[in-house]
Image (cartoon, rainbow, N blue to C red):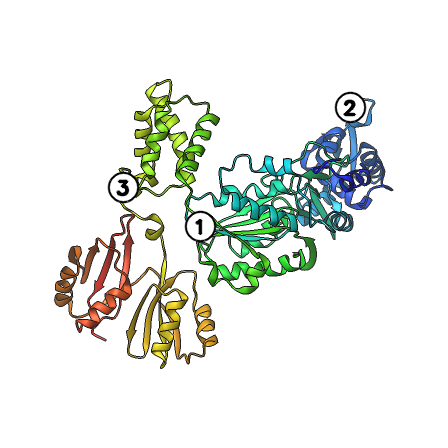
Amino acid sequence: MDYYHDEKMQILFEVLKQPKSLDEIDLSSEFIKNLILKIIATYGTIKVERIHEITGLHVNILEECIREMEDEELCASIGGGFLFPTVTYTIKREGRNLAEKLLKENPYTGMAPVTYELYYKIMEKQLEGRFPIKIPDEIIEEAFKDIVGSEEAKKTMIEAATVGKGFFIYGPPGTGKTFITSKMSDLLPPILIPRYIEFNEQVIQLYDPDFHKLCDEQPEDPRWVKIYAPFVFTGSELTIEKMETNFNQNKGVYETSPIVKANGGVLLLDDLGRQKEDHNMILNRLIIPLENRKEIVYVRGVPVTVHSHFIPVFSTNLDISIMDEAHLRRAPLHIFLQEPPVDEIIEVFKRNLDLLGEKYDEEIFERLRLVYTPKEDGGEGLTPTFAHARDLAQIAQAVRINREMEKIDVEILEEALERHVLIDLQRMDIDIAEAQQRLRTFRVETPQVEEAKELLLRYGAIEIGIEDVSILLELKKTINPTLLLEYLNENNIDLKNVEIITENNIRLQTSQVEEVERLLSECGSVELSIESGSILVDFEETVTPTQLLEYFNENNINVRDIKIITETKREFRKIILSKGASS
C-alpha cells in the first residue's frame, strides 16, 4: 500500500465491483430501461455492445432490461450474431412514442449514473478523517521538482495540505503565484468520485476531464473513477452565477460548479479583486461550503447536499488587511511572494531552454543578468519576474528557428528581449500594474469632515479633496458604497450620503470654456481642441478626476462633470469638458 492507494482506497475498490444483475445494482430497472430506450431512439439502430460502451452497464443487466423491453413492444432485434452483445436493436412504434416523451423531459443518453445514496455513502467513507495527513518526503519532492526557490512558500503549502487549511497568496505580478499554487494538489491523496449521480431521475455531472486527471488504477465499476486530487482554478471571469450548479438543457445534466468539482482537492480563486462582482460577495458565497464542507445544489427546485471538501487558495494583488475576518478565518495561512532573486530567474530560464531541447551559449545568462542589474551598477534595472524567464525561452527558440541558427546566442537573446512586450514596456518606464488600476470616485457627505478624512486615508483612499461638507475620494474599484458605509458607521461617523460619482467614466461640464482652456494648457495638457461644444484634452501624466476638480475649484471654475473617455497603455487620458450652464 502506498500514499496513492492506501488501505482505505483498497477497501473501496472491493466495494465498487461492477454490478452484474438488476439485484446488485443501485439503480432501478425503470431508470435503466428508460436510459436504454432513449439511446436506441437516438441512434435508430444500435448493437448491444455499443450500448454497453455508452452506459458502462454489464451486459447481463442490459440483457435483462432489453428482454423486458422486447416483451413490452418497445424495441426489437433486427440481426446480429449468436452472442447477445453482437445483436442489433431498433425501436418500435410504442417505444418511439415513449422515447419522445422521455427525451423531452430529459435528453440525457450517457453513462449510467450512481444513486445519490450510494454517492453520499462512499464520499462519507473517504472524507471522514481525511486530515491531518502525513505527506511522504518523496511526494513533496515530486510535487515541487519544477519550483525554483520559494522555500517559505513551499513550507506553508505543505502545512496547509497537512491540515487541510486554505491560504491567501499575494505579491507582485509575475512572481509565480498561480504556478506554485498549481502544485498544491499534488501533495494530496487521490479520491474516488462517480461520473454522474442520479437524484429523482435527474442526472448531476461530477466528473470533468478538464480538472479531473485519472489515476492508472481504476475501480471495476466504470461508473466510478479514481482521480488525482483535483486542482480547480478560476480567475477574473468568475461570477456569482458561475458558482452555482446549472442545468444544461442540451446534455440533460446538472453541471456542477467549481465549488463541487474541487471536492477532495484545491480550489484556486486567481486574481481575486478583478472579478465583476465585489470580492466580498464572492468570498461570502464560499463561507457555507467552507464551513460545512458541503454545498447545496438545486435539482428541479429541490435542495440536494453534495460534498465540497476542498482547500481554498486565494491569489490576489489586494491588500489582505482589508479582508473581512470571516474570510481570513477560512484561509488562515498566508504566503507573500516577493520579486525573485536574479539567480532564480536565470535558473528558470535555463531549465526552460533545456526542456525545449535548445542548445545555447553560456554568455546569454550573463546578458540576461544585466537586464535586472540596477542601473547604478551598469544594468537596465528591470523588475525580475518568473514570467519573463519562461516566455523568453520560447521567444528565443522562435527567433533561432526563423534565423535558421543552431543554437541561441547573445544576439538571438537580444532580439527575444526586444520582442517581449512586458520587458519592452518596462524599458519605456511604463508601469502596467498602475496603468491597469481601476478607480472609483466617491462623494461622502458628513458634518465630520476631518474625522472622516483621517479614517478614509487609513482605509486606502488614493486621492482626497474637500468640497463644503463633502469629501471627494478615490478608492480601488473593489470598494463599493456598502463597504464604505459599514466602515464609516463602525467608526461612528455621521453620514448624510455616500455615492459613486465616477467609475472611470467621468464628464466635466462648465460654461467657462475659454478660462478652462487656459488653465488646462498651464497644468500640462499635451493636446487641446474644441469639438462639438466640448474640449478634448490629453494629459501625458496620470491626472485623476479629484485632482482636476480641486484644480478647477481653486481657480473659481464652476465644474459640473468630468469624463475620461480613453486611457492608453502610456497612461494618456483624454478628457471631455462639455459646455453647459454653471452649477
Q: Which of 381 and 547 is in front in this view?
A: 381
Callout 2: SS: loop
> Which quarter shows the C terminus?
bottom left
Q: What residue type is labelled 1?
A: Gly
Q: Mark 3 points at which residue?
A: 375
Q: Which numbered mark, 2 or 3, is in the foreground of this view?
A: 3
Residue 493 against residue 100 in the figure, above or below: below
Could you tell which of marks 2 and 3 lies nearer the N-terminus?
A: 2
Residue 393 vertical placement versus 176 (above, below):
above
Give SS at disc 1.
Answer: loop
Given residues 492 and 439, the one toward you in this image is 492
**What's the CA distance linking mark 2 and mark 1?**
65 Å
Q: Mark 2 points at which residue?
A: 80
- Residue at left offset 39%, top offset 64%: 460
Comparing marks 2 and 1, which lies closer to the viewer? 1
Q: Which mark is residue 171?
A: 1
Q: Are marks 2 and 1 in contact (CB under 8 Å)?
A: no
Q: Where is residue 545 in the image (x, y as percent from the top left)?
A: 28, 64
Give the mark, 2 or 1, whose residue is nearer the N terminus: 2
Q: Residues within 10 Å of mark 1 (few under 14, many from 20)?
A: some
Q: What residue type is labelled 3?
A: Lys
The reply, left or right, for residue 300 in relation to residue 29 is left
Label 2 sits on what residue type? Gly
Is 132 placed above or below 523 here? above
**Circles 1 and 3: CB atoms closer than 8 Å:** no
